[in-house]
Amino acid sequence: MELIFVRHGQGQHTLSPPESLQHRNPSLTEEGVNQITLLKKNLPLNQGDLIVSSPTRRTIETATLLANGINEMITISPAVSPRMFPQNSKWKTLPCDKTLDKEFLKKDLPSVEVEDCSSEELWRRGINTIPEHVFKTIGNQFLDWCRQQHKEKIFIVSHDGTITSYRQLITGSLLSRKDFLKDGGWVRVYC
């Protein structure tokens, strides 16, 4: 199975840190929209592909741009929500990384599938601060779910720490923050 991890385009929360990290539900900037528009030209999706998005505004906006108006291609899952990398049990989730509520998403985005397999706790808590051993369990369950979709390609629109955590889980390689994708970047991983 081919997984293509896509980091969301530039978000409003990155414009003037650390103050902008306190912004809740940041959208893509104009530059972020341009990054994804360019990416779409170089990484076209086919009708049978699936896009799985983190439940944040900037990732859903990125997924929507990639889907080119075919929102039925998009599934939102808390298993790819923001994740700190590396993990630090003393750190807390920043306001910019709080996820959108499952019921809000169902109501606000009726043409997008909101994944119902995950527990209510995972939807509420996300994967940002969970210990590594818990992430491995959730990550492997998510990868099994991806296999069950029977798609040749699955695009996963997520965040730098989440993507790096999944890459590390899948490949078994030790990665660092130096391995983070840039805004609007992507990497292919076979699983």
Image: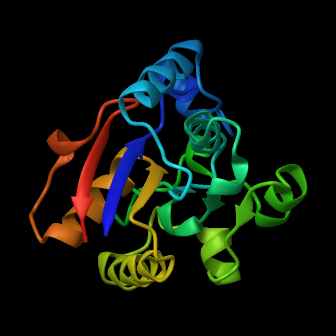
Q: Is residue 27 above or below residue 108?
A: above
The answer to which image quadrant residue 190 occupies is bottom left
Q: At 58% across and 19% down in the image, what residue appears?
A: 29
**Is residue 85 in sight in this rendering?**
no
Front position in the image: 156 or 175: 156
Q: Is residue 101 above or below residue 19?
A: below
**Is residue 153 in sight in this rendering?**
yes
Which image quarter holds the C terminus?
bottom left
Q: Check the image and name the residue furthest to the right.
A: 107
Residue 10: x and y in percent read 48, 25
Q: At 15% across and 68% down in the image, what residue appears?
A: 171
Q: At 17% across and 44% down in the image, what residue appears?
A: 179
The answer to which image quadrant residue 172 occupies is bottom left
Using residue 20 as the reference point, say whether residue 166 is left or right of it: left
Q: At 43% across and 20% down in the image, what residue appears?
A: 38
Front position in the image: 68 or 118: 68
Using residue 174 as the reference point, say whether residue 169 is left or right of it: right
Residue 109: x and y in percent read 82, 51
Q: Check the image and name the residue furthest to the front.
A: 47
Front position in the image: 65 or 175: 65
Residue 106: x and y in percent read 84, 61
